[in-house]
Image (cartoon, coloured by chain):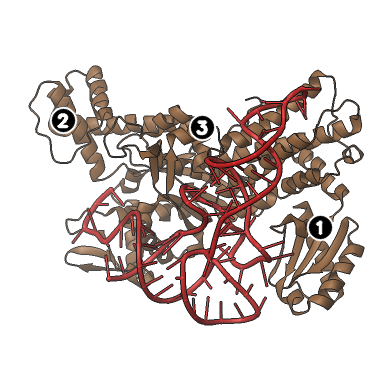
Chain colours: A brown, B red
Amino acid sequence: MRAINTLRTAFADILKENGFDWPEKTVIEPPRNPKFGDLSINAAILLAKNPHELAQKFAARLLVRCPDIQKAEAAGPGFCNVTFAPAFWQRIVPDIESAGDAYGNCAVGQGRRVLLEYVSANPTGPLHVGHGRGAAVGDSLCRLLRRTGYHVDSEYYINDAGNQMRMLGLSVWLRVLEKTGRDVTWPDEYYRGDYIVDIAQKLLAADPTLADCPEAEGLERCRTYAVKEILDGIREDLCAFRVEHLYWFSEKSLLDHEHHAVNTVLAALTAAGYTYTEENAFWFATEKLGDDKNRVLKKSDGSLTYFATDIAYHHNKFQRGYDSLIDVWGTDHHGYIHRLRAAISAMGQPRDRFHVVQIQLVNLLRDRKPVGMSTRAGTFETLAQVVQEVGVDAARFMFLSRKSDSPLDFDLELVKQRTLDNPVYYVQYAHARICAVLRRAEETGITLPHPVTEALLAPLDTVEDSALLRKADSFENTLRAAATLLSPQYVSYYLMELAGLLHSYYAKHQVLAPDNMPRTLARMALLRAVGQVLRNGLDILGVSAPDTM
RNA sequence: GCGCUCGUAGCUCAGUCGGAUAGAGCGGCAGCCUCCUAAGCUGUAGGCCACAGGUUCGAUUCCUGUCGGGCGCACCA
C-alpha cells in the first residue's frame, strides 16, 4: 500500500500540473510479471491514445517528482512501469513493526455496521462437513471485515419453529416410549440418528416416569429438551472449530405474542400494496420485484410459510440498525435469493445492502472415493469427526482456499498429507522456520533492536529481499480486495505466495552469518516482519501460526 | 421446460469486478542437506482459458447463442 499510495499521489500531482483530471479507468497495481517493474500505472484512455508523447512525459516527471523511483518508463498501450529504489522497500519493515498485529488493516469499511449471519443449521442434528465450510467462510469473513474497517456482528439464526421441530420432538418421544417397553408405530418420516436415542436416554435418566405423562406434554418436553441438547452440541462443535457467534436469534421469537413481528411485517407489505388473497391463501406479489413467480405468505390453512418469517427476520435485522446484511447460505437455497431480495426492496431497502455468500457442496472423500454422505449416522460425516481426524487448521485452510461457491472435494487422506495439496503446512512451516532462526539468534546472543532503524535495513538489497518486501507491502491491498469481493481465498493464496518467497529466500540466503553482523541484523528484521504478516494473514483464516513444527 | 451457476495444464484449483508474455501445487523428468527445520529449494516439460459470434484501442473476464457438468424450480423448512 505504501507503494501504491506514493505513486498515486505523485501521478495525481503531475496530472494536475498538466491540466488533466484523474483518468476514469486508471489502475495502479503490481504487474503480473515482475520483469515489468515494481508497479504499473495503467491510465488506459489517457496514455493509450498517446503512448509516446504523454506517457514518456509522465514517466520523466515521475522521476523528478518522487526520489524513491529508480526507473520509470512508458511501455505498451497505457502503461507506465515504475521501479522503486531498495531504500523505499526497506521502509516497509518499520511500517510492519509499528503496526504489529494491526498491520494490513485499513478503514475502507468506514465503520459501517454489518450483520453477518452464518451456519444457521436447523437444530435437528449435529453439524456436518458442509456446515463446516459455511462456518469457516463466515468466521473468516467476520475477521476480514473487522480488519478492513467494518463493525461486524455475527449471528446464528435458529430455526426453532415449524414442522421440523415437531418432527424432532416426535422422534425423541417415540424413542422414549420404545425404551419403556411400549408398542411404537414409526411414521414414514422421523429422525433416525443415534443422537436421538441418546437424547431419549438422557431424558429418561432424569425422569423415569416421563413416558407416563400425557402425549401433548411429553412431546413438548421432548422437543424442548432435544433442541437445547442439539444446540449445545452445535455450539460445542463450533467452539472446537474456533467459531463463535455473538447472537443466537430464535425464529420462534418472531412469532411470540399476539401481534408478533411477522404479522406486523405482513401488514406493512399489505399497506404498500404488495399482497393479495387468492384461493384462500395470502400472497406476496414478488413478481413485480424481479422474482419469477408470486409467493405464498400465509397458507390456506392459516399457517405462515417459512418465507413469511424470514421476511420478518430480515426486517428485524435492518430495524436493529445494520447498514448491510450478509447471509452465508448453501447453494441449495440459491433459488430463494430472488424472492428475499424482492422482499427487501419492498421494505424500501436498497438492494446492495443485502449480500448472499453461497457455499457449495462438500464432497467428502477418502483416497479419492466418496464417503457416505447420506443421512445415515456413523461414518465420517459430522464436522466434529472430520475435525478430530484432520485437525482444525487443515480443515479450515482447505475450506478457505477455494471459491466458496464452487464444489469442493475434501479428501481426508490428502488433507492429512504434508504436501502442497494441503498447503496449510507450507504456510505454517514458513512461520515456524522464521521463529527457529530468530530463536537461534537469541541463543547465540544476537539481539535485534525494536524498532529497527532505516540504516540497519540497508543491506536488504538483493532481488529476493525486495520481492519479499513488495509482497509484504501488498498485504493491505489483498485484504481490501478480499473484503470487497467477500472472498477469503484471496488471503489464502496470498499467504501461499508469501510463504513461497520466504522458503526461496531461506534456501538462497544464509540469515545468521556472524562474520557479517550488519547483514545478519537486517535479514533478521526482514524475517521478523514477514513472520508478522504471516501471523496476521493466518489469523484472518482462523488458522494457528506455530513457532515450531 | 424455466432460472441460477460453472467449464482455465494429465489432475486439483487461483486469476483483485476489461489490460501487457494466463499463474500455483500435485503428478512427470533432471538436480540440491559438511550451512539457521529437506513439511524445503532449483531447473524443465505441459494451454486455441469448452465452442462460435458480438461490444472496443484491448476479452479468460462483459453480451448473445450452442454444447457439456452442478444446483434449484412447494400453500416444505
Nearest the viewer among A229 and A367 is: A367
Residue A127 coordinates in the image, percent (x, y) = 37, 36
Residue A103 visible (yes or no) = no
Please state, as top left, top right, bottom left or bottom right, where the C terminus of chain A lies in the image.
Answer: top right
Please tell me whether mark 3 or mark 1 is closer to you in this view: 3
Marks 3 and 2 belong to one chain: yes
Dot 2: what SS? Answer: helix
Which label is found at residue A460? Answer: none
Query: A144 left or right of A127?
Result: right
- Residue B6 is situated, as x and y percent measured from the top left of the image, at 45, 59
Q: Residue furthest left?
A: A183
Give me the disc on residue A417: 3
Taking depth in this image into account, of A64 and A121 the one nearest to the observer is: A64
Give the residue number, with chain letter if any, for mark 1. A6
Q: Which amino acid type corresponds to the residue marked 2 in the rendered image?
A: Leu
Q: Quadrant of residue A159?
A: top left
Between marks 3 and 2, how big is the CA–CA gap?
44 Å
In this picture, is B48 found above or below A370? below
Q: Image point 85% across, 63% down: which residue? A: A72
Amino acid at pointer 3: Gln
Indicate the amino acid at tag 1: Thr
| Chain of residue at mark 1 | A
Q: Mark 3 near mark 1, Cβ–Cβ under 8 Å?
A: no
Q: Secondary structure at mark 1?
A: helix
Q: CA distance from mark 2 to mark 1?
A: 70 Å
Determine the chain carrying the residue at label 3: A
Residue at the spot 35% in from the left edge and 52% down from the top edge = A332
Q: Say which element carries label 3.
A: loop
Residue matched to label 2: A174
